[in-house]
Amino acid sequence: MSGEILLELQFFVRAFLWGMFLALVYDLIRIFRRLVSHGTAALAVEDILYWLACGVLIFRMLYQENSGAIRGFAIAAVVLGMLLCLQLEKLLKKVRKKLHNSVKRGIMSSKSTQGGKKS
């Protein structure tokens, strides 16, 4: 029985990691969209292709790992992986912004203290 639970846990972790991977791929798509201007049709095509690829990859995972049976906990693991990745991205963005502001304040304060001194 414990071997079966271990297999289910491993399956859950792999599904969770697939969710994180899919969220990271979408982040790359968003970065690409910022670098290259897109029209509405191009955005729609990219989104459709992304979600089709997600569907194929998730189906492939379910087929290989679980004989094609759709398991609610596997879908939940993928969604949780995606959500965790998005939350980590938000957290990293806040940390990066605070760090940027701290460095900026440090530079500005050092310029103001040095600005009054003339050599």
Image (cartoon, rainbow, N blue to C red):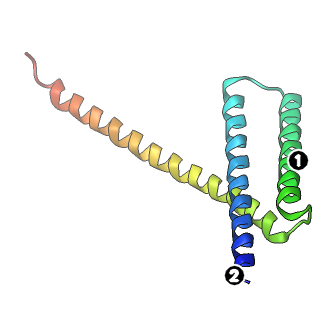
Quadrant of the image for the C terminus? top left
Label 1, secondary structure: give it.
helix
Sequence-wise first label, 2 or 1: 2
Label 2, secondary structure: give it.
helix
Any mark on residue 2, and which? 2
Q: What is the three-letter code of the residue carrying label 1?
A: Val
Residue 61 lies, in percent from the top left, at: 82, 55
Q: What is the three-letter code of the residue carrying label 2?
A: Ser
The residue under the point 69% across, 29% down is 32
Nearer to us in this view, 100 or 108? 100
The residue under the point 60% across, 56% down is 87
Nearer to us in this view, 22 or 108? 22
The residue under the point 84% across, 70% down is 72
* Label tally: 2
User: Which residue matches tag 1?
Assistant: 56
Q: Quadrant of residue 19?
A: bottom right
Above or below, 21 against 103 in this view is below
Q: CA distance from mark 2 to mark 1?
A: 31 Å
